[in-house]
Amino acid sequence: MVLRHLQRLHGRLADIIGSFFGKRKLMKIGVYGPVNAGKTTLANTICLDWLGEELGKVSAIPHETREIQMKEHVEMKQDGKKLVFNLIDTPGIATKIDFEDFLKFGMSKQAARKRAKEATKGVIEAIKWLDKMDLVLVIMDSTKEPVDQVNVTILGNLEARGKPVIIVANKLDVKSSKAYRIRSAFPQYPVIGVSAKTGYNMKELYKTMLEVKK
């Protein structure tokens, strides 16, 4: 643990020193998607694979992630290639957030209203952070219809900003998964099917991330 900490500290110092000589700062890779698509589970899997530690808490309750979360200096090495980046997990994007949706999970009205307010703020913050991203992983639930208002809004915002995108078709471990629908709906983007929960096909996602880096 001490050695790993020293290695990460050295890497950060190298980034700071490099910035004085015109070198590019670390890439920022953002994880975006609808509520409960598996964003934090994916971020945790990436961090466990390359850092040995998780990034954030996962819950079945919507909008568990309500603030931007970041892991710095994630170093990925595969097939002789290397990618060093900061990984940013963002709040789930939603077009409507109603406090009543949280009551079914046993929350009091006060707690539900508080979460709804925080979730709304988180969505706004996530959209603002799009401008800072160098690559975005748009995670979609492969058990659901992919063409909906949230997915189209996210991709539209990214296209307008000219951001590189990889679509991650998550939940391949679920029997009702139909990743082919996502590939058919968005053929202009690379689509990688994974199970963030089990780690299935993550190597293919890493390969694609290494290929699209600039």
Image (cartoon, rainbow, N blue to C red):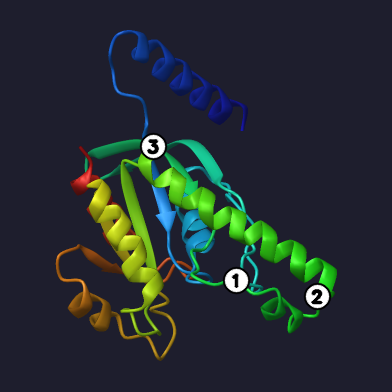
Q: What residue is drawn where x is 64% and y is 63%?
A: 64
> Can residue 163 be seen by looking at this rendering?
no
Q: Nearer the viewer, mark 1 or mark 3?
A: 1
Q: Position of residue 159 (x, y in %)?
A: 24, 55
User: 11 left or right of 207?
Assistant: right
Three-letter amino acid code of the residue under disc 3 = Phe
Q: Are marks 2 and 1 in contact (CB under 8 Å)?
A: no
Residue type (three-letter) at the residue carrying disc 1: Ile
At 27% from the left and 66% from the top, the residue drawn is: 192
Q: Nearer the viewer, residue 66 or 100?
A: 100
Of badges 3 and 2, nearer the viewer stands 2
From this viewpoint, which residue is outermost toward the bottom?
A: 176
Quarter of the rendering occupied by the N terminus? top right
> Closer to the N terminus: mark 2 or mark 1?
1
Give the residue at x 27% y 47%. Answer: 161
Camera-nearest residue between 158 and 142: 158
Residue hosting label 1:
97
Q: Quadrant of residue 155?
A: bottom left
Instruction: Indicate the amino acid at tag 2.
Output: Met
Spatial CA distance of label 3 from label 2 is 37 Å
Residue that carries the numbered disc 3 in the rendered image = 85
Residue denoted by label 2: 107
